[in-house]
Amino acid sequence: MRPTDLFRISCIQVLRQYRKNIGVALTIILGTAGLIVVLTMGRSIEESICTDLELIGNATRITILFKQLPTTRYPVDKREFKQETIDGLKTIPGIDQVGVIAVRNGYVKVMYQNNISSFQMIAVDDLFWKVHNSSAQSGVLFDQEDLKQHSAVCVLGQRTAQELFGDLDVAGQFISVNNSIFQIVGVLDSISMSDKDRHIFLPITTAQDRISSVSPVNKIYIRCHSWDDVEHVIASIPVVVNSFQPNDEIEIFLPEEILARVKAIALGVKIFVQLALLATLLLGGIGIWNIMMMSVRSRTREIGLKKAIGAEDHDIFFQFLTESLVLSISATLMGFFLGWGGVTITASIIQNVPPKDLFWLSVVIGFSFSLILGIVAGLAPAIKASRMEVVNALRYE
């Protein structure tokens, strides 16, 4: 039998039994689509989780500061991280954002109309918000342009806004901070930094110009792309800092317990998803085997007739094996389209671009698995059909 005829007959036979095949086909389709989504978007989903979930965000956020000096010898600590050091840290592979902070010891006096209160003040850059995954409860957060122009703007914590105004919608209002006038551009959300809801945030350039006793840049926050990058980043930080500031000793802080829990949860979820996908595909293989065995039994007389008119054992063998492959591969091809749809939707939800190289790699893996699945599932029924005795097959009722 010619290969083209064999393929055509097998396709017709699979279509004739579509009611029997639909359940198995759906299993393979869903398993293939899930495999493609997991392999293609797994890394992007992991990075998105790191960015969006505060618990995991804490696990990927590293704090760098100077080791504390004996106060008797050094009454004023004037150490600061140089811009070269900050730029060097940004080149470490695995780092997503680097934000800096300067503080003022004690409280600042804040006045609105006739109300005078005292709050803690923090001077930050625009990347500070991204490191902490912060957003504005109302209004906006100041940006890089405000830092460049040394704008007299500020962001309030929620308790600060409530105590001063009794409201959170205060963008556009003006307050006095240590006798300097600032315009409020927004109020910080309560999730990203709940411990700083009674603070005032100023652009670091503006604070150093207008507020006295503001410290130099003495603390750096780093956010990694994912928890897998944390270990490498921590090992690289001292090397980079020492190359620009060899005489300064630093301390690195990381929530190790949270990181360990996040990794354990991630590993558990990853294993569960992979086992579920494997089980789905294996069930598809078992379904193909079961359908092909039933097909052999129901077509016993057909097999006998074909052999009686001259069909060889290998003809019968390849026909049933090809039917198994057609069912497996056709379901896998439909799974590819469903998988691409799932990848597109997932990328849209997490606002990412689907990595096409990973998609095509997952397609190759899925196609290879489908070939193996079709061959393994159809092998035993094909052998059974090819070895069937002609006389017994013709007598079968």
Image (cartoon, rainbow, N blue to C red):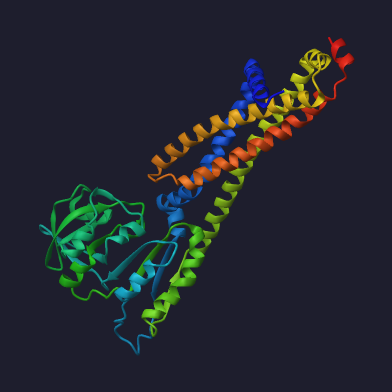
Q: Is residue 319 above or below residue 257?
A: above
Can you tell which quarter of the image residue 39 is in?
top right
Q: Name the quadrant of the C terminus.
A: top right
| Residue 380 visible to the viewer | yes
Task: From the viewer's perspective, tell me whether residue 153 is left or right of residue 75.
Answer: left
Residue at point 64%, 15% (across, down): 16
Closest to the observer: 90 or 379?
379
Residue 149, position as x, y percentages in the image: 15, 64
Q: Quadrant of residue 26?
A: top right
Residue at x-position 12% and y-position 66%: 180
At 43% from the left and 65% from the top, the residue drawn is 62
Which corner quadrant holds the N terminus? Answer: top right
- The residue lying toward the viewer, choosing from 314 and 376, is 314
Q: Is residue 231 left or right of residue 159?
A: right
**Vertical relation: 335 (above or below) 52:** above
Q: How many marks?
A: 0
* 257, 265: nearer the viewer: 265
Q: Residue at coordinates 26% horizontally, 75% vertically from top-left?
A: 215
Residue furthest out toward the bottom: 73
Q: Is residue 61 left or right of residue 75?
A: right
User: Which percent across, then down, holds residue 245?
Assistant: 37, 81
Q: Position of residue 34 (x, y in %)?
A: 55, 37
The quarter of the picture where residue 347 lies is top left
Residue 67 in view in this figure: no
Q: Nearer the viewer, residue 304 or 51?
A: 304
